[in-house]
Every structure is written in structure tokens, then in C-alpha cells.
Amino acid sequence: MERLSSGLRINSASDDAAGLAVINKMTASIKDYGMNVRNSVDTINLLLTAESALDQITNVQQKLADLAVQSASGTYEQQDRDSMELELYALVAEIDRIAVNTRYSGVPLLDGTFAVSGSGSSGVLPVSIDAFSTSTVGRTWGGPELFDNGDFDDATVSSSVGNVDTINGWKIYKEQIRLGQSGVLGATVVNGYNAPIDTTNATNNDGSASSGDDGSIIQGTYNWKLEDGKLRLFSGLGFGNVQISDDGTTDVQQKVPSGGGDIIHGPYIVSESSKQFNIGDKISFDWQAGGGKDAYDVFAYLLDESNGNTITLLDESEEATADGSLSAVTTATTIVTTEGTYKFVFIAGSHDYSKGGVSGASLFIDNIAIDRVRLPAEQQHLVSQISVLSVAEAENATDVLSYSMEQTSKKRAELGALINRYSSAIDGYSMMGLNMLQARSRIKDTEYTVETSKLAKQQILAQASMAMLAQANTSKNAVLELIK
């Protein structure tokens, strides 16, 4: 009767202990399947939100492409392209705004942080969405422009003529270079122009002013090598000692000027190629120097190959703290102030700081990079870098936007595949939950055909017993009536 009234075959552990344990496991699994269905539905809604945002971004990219094609036409004046550039900036900013503000229940979706790890066996499907912005889509990935062999990975000598060695991107001059002083350009000619003036007023150890770059070497060498991934320019006898002299003495231990305090520059390197720089472009490189047994005096500059104008990149002088000591690796940064087509020149140098001691110096150079305010058309690879201020830039922007729309479409396809996968997962979880529910029902629920037949049997037996007892009582009364 309890099974029929409750509808359950197992109402307590005493009814079927093993069956009750199986039912509890099945109940937990049914709840898991139900929660997986709910989580999958939520994830599909999240992915649909991200895909909808990318759809809007695609529309903006198409507007940008129309603008680039329009600007590429030769029928517009510069003033018209200036107006188009303003619209381009606004549309590019709108793409980033959409990406930054695309969220699902407060969770950012397009900044690269959203990811759910899991596996199909655990019921949690893995999903992640890569970062999306105008600085991550286009023809190639962005970053500072490294100057030709600016990290000196390739130090193979392709030619060597006299004191000049040529490696990839650079000519290395293993000789002295005289910089200018006292308002007069240097005597050495670099790429057709006299060397610039070294304006640093170096002082000697006794506080007197340096004699400047007017010394000459009787005995000494200039050389270079690749050391710890950096190009090292050094001067000296063997590893680093240069004897400075302008008085004709021959003492190999101490060849110094009659007055002392001279600065000897060399060796130096000049880039083979030149770069067009605009006002605001940033030049950076890592440098390190050592003064041997005296002091170093290093110099670097940009040389405009069209007119000889220069921009100083490095002008440093410092005493060696100990024999062979080196300064800390430092990143030098210079902002270009004059537009032009420039070559790089780096110069090692030695300062007779002690006015009579042995001198020699080294200059290490590495990681020469360019961070541009506005890239040349051929280097505008990302959507964040494109411009329509000229026909060349507009044509390049068309190419970049074509790539970016392909990348956006690929991301949307990836999201669509994930949505379809989660839809299939929902069907699977629902079917497994239904099958588990049916299996539990066969163990847990009452089998009414069996239980009702048992009840009917019991009722028939009870009624027959009552009838037999009633008949027995009736026979007893009949006998008593006859006796009367």
C-alpha cells in the first residue's frame, strides 16, 4: 500500500539498500546533465554576443575600406583627404570602442582574457576568445621597426677593403675619425660630409678642460667583434689599450700628448641604407662603454644624406672605475626634430683623462629600433596604423583592410563553430539526462501493474476470508435455531 500511495518502489534503505545507492548516483548525474544544458545555453548566448560585436566591427571595416578606395582616387585635393583622415580616425576608434565594451554579464569578451578550460569528459567544453583590436588585425603584427641588422645577428663579413669591413647593413671603419670642435666641423668626411662637432666639454682628472679631438696615434689598432650578441667597437693594442700621442715619443708603455687630455675617436660604423624619418619619430638603441685604463668618449648621430644635417643620438664621456670596467647597459632614446632621410653613425672613442696614462675604450651597440609616429605607406601593416592622406597610403589601407576583414571573418567562423558545438552538446546532454531519468524510474518508481495485482490478490483473499467467516457464523446460528 505504501508503494502505491507514494509511487515509489524504494521508500527507505530497508526496501532495497543497493538500489537506493544506485538511485542517488543517477540523481546526481541527472542534475549534472541539467546544469550542463543550462551552462551551454548561457555560453551560446555569450558567444552570440561576441559574434554580434564582430558583425558590427565588420560593418565599420567595410566603411573604412570604402573610405580608402575613395581617397585612392586622383580626383581629390589634399584638403579632401584631410577630411577623410578625420573620419578614418573616428571609425578606427569606434572599432576599439566596440571591442573594449563588448561584455556578457560584466565579463569582457574581446580583450583576450576570456577563456574556459575543460574537456568533453568532464562535461565542460573548452572555449577561449582571442584579443581583438585595431592593433592586432591587419597585414602583420605590429611592434617597433628594427633597423636593418639593428640587432647585429648577422656579423658575417661580406667584403674587406683596406680598413673597411662590410657586414649586413653596415660598413665598419677600423680607423680614427676626427670630430669637429670649437665651432669647426671635423676633418674626417663621412658619406660626403664632414664629421659633426662634439660639443661635450670633457674634463681631465685635474679639472682642466680636455684638449679635444686633436690627437693622433703613433701606435695603436682599431677593431670590432661580436660579443654577447652586441657589436663591440674597440681600440687598443690587443684587447684594449691605445697609446695616444702627438709629440712623436716612442715609449710603448706611455704614448701620450705633450699636454695630455686628448680624445681619440675610432673605430666607427655607418649604416649602408638610409631611413626616412618624420618629426616625432623615436630612435632607440642599447649601448654600453668602457674606458680601458682611462676614460671613454663615445658619440653617435643621424646623418641626413641629402644635406649633411645631423641629429645627435649619443654623446657621453666617463672615467673607467677600474681597468677594463664597463658602464651599465643603457637604452638611449632620441626624438627626431627635423624631417629627412638619415643614415646611422656610431663612434667609439678614448679620452686621456689621466693626462699621461695608457688609454683605450670600447663601445657596444645593440637593438637599434625605430618607433614611428606615422609609418611610411609600405610599413602601415595594422588597422591602427593606416592612413588615407595620400594615394599610396590609401592603396595600402585597402590592402590592410582586406586582410583585417578576412581575420574578422575567421574569428566569426570560429565563434560559429563553437556555437554549433554547444548546440550539439545541449542535444547530447538532454538525451543523456532523459535516458538516465528513465533508467532511474525503472529502479525507483513503483511498478503499478505488479503492485495493483498484489493488492487485488490481498483484497480477494481478505474478502474470501470474511465471507468464509460470515458463512461459518451463519451455520452456527442455523443449528441453534433447529435445537430450539
Image (tube, rainbow, N blue to C red):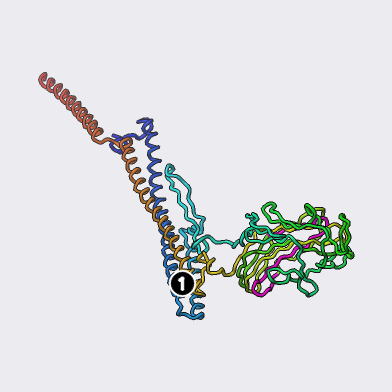
Majority secondary structure in the magenta region: strand
**Rendered position, 77 above or below 420:** below
Local crowd at mark 1 within 10 Å, few (<14), some, or many (≥20)? many
Q: Is residue 106 visible?
A: no
Q: Amino acid at mark 1?
A: Ala
Residue at label 1?
68
Residue drawn at (29%, 38%) of the image: 5
Could you tell whether 56 is left or right of 238 in the image? Answer: left
Q: Residue furthest front?
A: 162
Q: Is residue 444 visible?
A: yes
Task: Return the x and y of residue 423 as percentages of the image width and height.
Answer: 36, 51
Could you tell whether 113 is left or right of 228 in the image? Answer: left
**Rendered position, 23 above or below 344:** above
The N terminus lies in quadrant = top left
Looking at the rendering, the stretch of residues picked out in magenta corresponds to 286-311
Residue drawn at (86%, 59%) of the image: 255
Q: Residue furthest left?
A: 482
Task: Return the x and y of residue 462 as percentages of the image width and height.
Answer: 21, 28
Task: Return the x and y of residue 114 as percentages of the image width and height.
Answer: 49, 54
**Rendered position, 213 above or below 458:** below
Queried whether the magenta region covers residue 304, the answer comes back as: yes
In front of the other: 33 or 172: 172
Dividing the picture into quadrants, the one containing residue 339 is bottom right
Task: Return the x and y of residue 185 as percentages of the image width and height.
Answer: 76, 73
At mark 1, the secondary structure is: helix
